[in-house]
Structures are given as structure tokens and as C-alpha cells.
Amino acid sequence: MAQAHSNRPISPHLQIWRWGPAMLVSILHRVTGNGLAFAGLALLLWWVGAIAGGEQSYQTFISFVWTGAGSPLAALTAILAKLVLVGLTWAFFQHMASGLRHLVLDIGVGYELHTNARWSVLTLVFSVLATALFWAFVLMPR
Amino acid sequence: MGNGTSIGRVRGLGSSHQGAHHWLLTRLTAVGNLILIPYLIVSLALLPDFEWATVHSWLAKPVPATALILTFINTFYHARLGIQVMLEDYVHEEAGKIAAWLLVNIVPFAAGAFGVVSVIRIALGAA
Ligand code: HEM
Ligand code: HEM
């Protein structure tokens, strides 16, 4: 830390505090935002670049990320990529819900303890439900 | 700068006068994301299949192409602002700060440009 040399009193660190929903949602906002930024945007770029590259390169993308066809390596990454994709959809729904919560807090409402905890919990419930519904819809036979 | 206590150094340095603007741009791009990303994932979920021809011809249409280009601008900017905040919280050494500054000012723009060029190529019918 920049001020490591000072012996001024410092505040108790993270593990001292009793966890509450708002703390969980706060750290999840950071984790999901950064996860989406690094993994999500990288995947988005690969996807669009593969489409632009033509049918061949799109097939390569699909086999690494979804079907696993063609090589043992692709078979492995396709399994991992499915976990990543489900994780990213959850991360998006969670970040969207907690981001909306931020926008509401920004206008100065929602700070009463019970209200704050209730909306924090609701973002968690929403993200899990939305992820389940989204994948049920995508995987539904059509 | 002064060489007193941390707080003294902060006082000597003063505000960068950019915090409020950074904050506001985060909110502005958040609202953009609120439209662009749901549009993207709902559109993808509604595609009849994920064959190259299907995805390519969908993305070649004006509205999806425009939306995806806006995503490469708006969402990459939002992510760049957010990553900066995260790095400011966790990177404390001078060398690290310089590396972080280079990272958030170069990579997102290079990556976004690649995305925009890809969409243009798709929309204008090459490949
Ligand atoms: C394990 C526990 C905790 C973790 C992992 C954690 C993590 C974080 C993170 C990642 C942020 C920045 C994200 C954001 O602005 O939304 C943040 C902001 C903050 N945290 Fe915590 N935190 C914890 C506990 C606490 C506790 C116990 C307090 C106070 C007693 C606290 C006070 C704050 C404040 C005041 C901010 C700034 C909020 C703002 O930007 O408006 N945190 N925390
Ligand atoms: C539904 C759309 C979204 C909304 C409403 C939203 C909202 C927000 C808001 C309000 C903040 C600032 C939080 C604070 O002040 O502490 C934020 C931070 C952030 N967002 Fe988003 N966002 C959205 C989508 C995205 C997407 C798609 C990405 C990445 C691809 C992303 C990446 C980030 C990152 C990295 C941060 C910084 C988190 C931190 O470390 O403190 N966001 N978002």
C-alpha cells in the first residue's frame, strides 16, 4: 500500500465484518463487471472476428466454443466454454441488476437498512432466475 | 507534492478535476449497455439456428450492425472506465500504475476498433 510506512490508525480489514447482502452484491458487481470486461468482451471479439473471417473461421470458433468437433483440444475447450458462457450470462444479469441498483442509489433512495438488504437479495434472485430462463429458452428444441 | 504524511501529499496534489466526469460517463454508458446488451442476447436467442450463413446475414442487416458497432464503442468505454476504477483500487506501485495506464488507454481502443472493422466487413459483404 502507498501509505505502508505510516503508523496512523487504520480501519479493520475485510474479514472482521459480518457479511450482509449489500456487501455481497457490492463485491459481485465488481467481480461480474470485470469478468464481463475481460472474458466476455474477448469472446465477443473472437465471435465477430470469426464471422467476418468467413464460414471456415466461424466453424473453428463454433467447434472450440460449442460443438468440440475436430480435435481433442476443441473437445476440452468446448466443455469449459459452456461453463464460461453460462457464467457470463449469469454475470451479465447480476451486473445489470446490481448496476440498476447503483443507478437507483445514485438518485438518493434505497438506503434504509431493510429496503437496501431486500433489493440486494432481489438482484441475486433475479440473476439466477434470468440465467435459467435464458438457457432454457436457447436450448429448447425448435 | 510535499513529503509529509499521505494525507498531506494528497492535499498538496489536489483534485484531478476529472472524477465527476468519469462517474457521469460510467452512468451514461451503463444506460447504453442496458439497451445494447439485452438487444444482442435476445436477438441471438431468437435466431432460428447458429449456422454461419444465418448469423452472418443477420449481422449484415443495418440495425444489428449499427447496434453491434455501438456496443463496441459504448460497452468497451464502460468497461474501460470500470477497469480503471478497479486498478486504481488495487495497484499502488508507480511501475504498476504506468502499466495500468497504458493498458486502459490502449487495449480497449484497439479491441473496439477490431470489432468495428469486423462488423463493417460483414455488413458490406466481404468474405
Ligand atoms: C468482505 C467485505 C467487503 C468487500 C469484499 C468489499 C469490497 C468493496 C468493493 C469491491 C468496493 C467498490 C465497488 C463499488 O463501489 O460498488 C467497495 C466500496 C466500498 N466499501 Fe466495501 N467491501 C467490504 C466491506 C465493507 C465494509 C464492512 C464497509 C464499511 C464498514 C465498506 C465500505 C465501503 C465503502 C464506503 C465503499 C465505497 C462505496 C462507493 O463507491 O460509493 N466495505 N467495497
Ligand atoms: C446492463 C447493463 C449495465 C449496467 C446497468 C451497468 C452499470 C454499472 C454501474 C452503475 C457501474 C458503476 C458502479 C460503481 O460506481 O461502483 C458499473 C461498473 C462496471 N461495469 Fe457495468 N453495467 C452494465 C453492463 C456492463 C458490461 C456489459 C460490462 C463489461 C463488459 C460492464 C463492466 C463494468 C465494470 C468492469 C465496472 C467496474 C466495477 C468495479 O470494479 O467497480 N458493465 N456498471
Image: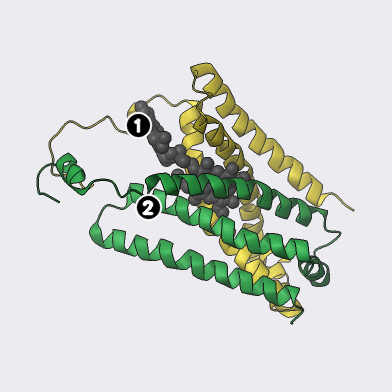
Chain colours: A yellow, B green
Label 2 residue SS? helix
Report the front residue among B74 and B107: B74
Residue A127 is situated, as x and y percent measured from the top left of the image, at: 64, 38
Tell me which chain the residue with mark 1 is part of: A
Task: Say which amino acid is labelled 1.
Answer: Gln
Q: Is residue B88 visible?
A: yes
Comparing A129 with B56, the one in front is B56
Looking at the image, which residue is at 36% across and 60% down?
Answer: B100
Measured along the vertical axis of the image, is residue B43 above or below residue B54? above
> Residue shown at 66%/51% (left/top)?
B37
**How far across and how far down the image is residue A109, in percent?**
53, 24
Q: Residues within 10 Å of mark 1 (few under 14, many from 20)?
A: few
Q: Quadrant of ligand 1?
A: top left
User: Dot 2: few (<14), some (14–19), or many (≥20) neighbours within 10 Å?
Assistant: some
Q: Residue at x 76, y 66 (%)?
A: B59
**Residue B84 at x, y percent in the picture:** 41, 53
> Share a chain, discs 2 and 1?
no
> Does dot 1 land on a helix, a strand or a loop?
helix
The three-letter amino acid code for the residue at tag 2 is Leu
Q: Which residue is mark 2?
A: B87
Which one is closest to the eye, mark 2 or mark 1? Answer: 2
Q: Nearest the camera: A51 or B101?
A: B101
Horizontal arrangement in the rendering, residue B123 relative to residue A1 (left or right): right
Subunit ID for the residue under disc 2? B
The residue closer to the viewer here, A62 or B29, is B29
Q: Position of residue A111 (x, y in %)?
A: 49, 22
Name the residue furthest right: A142
